[in-house]
Image (cartoon, rainbow, N blue to C red):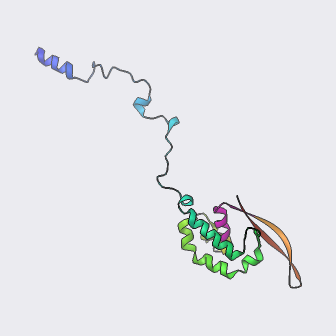
Amino acid sequence: MESLQNFISSNSTGIGSDDTNQIPANNKDIIGSSSDEKEKKTRNRPDKKTRYHLERQNLIKELNEIIGITENNKSVLLYDIERNEKLKDKLRELVPEIKRIYKCGTWGYFKEEIKGGGNEITLMRSIYNDSDYEITTKQKIIERGNKKIRNTQYHFNMK
């Protein structure tokens, strides 16, 4: 009987054993990590901006050629953009590619309930804004034929 009691007391992890009577150094050992020291989770894959950097640059170069933006001339009239059918056709053609290389869920072009949805100019502005371009506007009076027309001039500047 005595050997049985010695066996139980030496192998026991219940009340009275040295392991359970120890108090943890801090509450982290009991609860886990505290809410103040949460580890920031990082993405395993890069975002679309870094993944499709070259494709975005090529798209911007292509749009610049169609619109007529160069190193020396960084502005264009809205009047000319609205009447540029080549630009509108190219943007409509590139919609699947644009959806692939840009995060465009909140863009007005893709929201039909928003006024201006489906307008290629809003799509073009969204592409440039998401590609780190700043688009500023300025009112300008131009002459078309014998009429003076007030129009908006877009300036494209790299941020």
User: With 73 as the anchor, is 93 left or right in this view?
Assistant: left
Q: Quadrant of the C terminus?
A: bottom right
Residue placed most toward the observer, 156 or 25: 156
- Answer yes or no: is residue 103 visible: no
Residue at 25% over, 24% down: 13
Residue placed most toward the observer, 65 or 81: 65
Q: Position of residue 138 (x, y in %)?
A: 81, 67
Main SS, magenta residues = helix
Q: For the view shown, which residue lies furthest in the left direction?
A: 1
Residue 34 included in the magenta stretch of the image: no
Q: For the view shown, which residue lies furthest in the top direction?
A: 2
User: With 117 as the anchor, is 20 left or right in this view?
Assistant: left
User: With 46 as the anchor, is 148 left or right in this view?
Assistant: right
Instruction: Place residue 73 in its image quadrant.
Output: bottom right
Residue range (magenta): 123-135
Please determine whether, in this image, residue 2 is positioned above or below residue 149. above
Residue 132 included in the magenta stretch of the image: yes
Q: Position of residue 106 (x, y in %)?
A: 60, 63
Instruction: Place residue 97 in its image quadrant.
Output: bottom right
Residue at 57% over, 62% down: 53
Instruction: Place residue 32 in its image quadrant.
Output: top left
Residue at 38% over, 21% down: 23
Residue placed most toward the observer, 12 or 46: 46
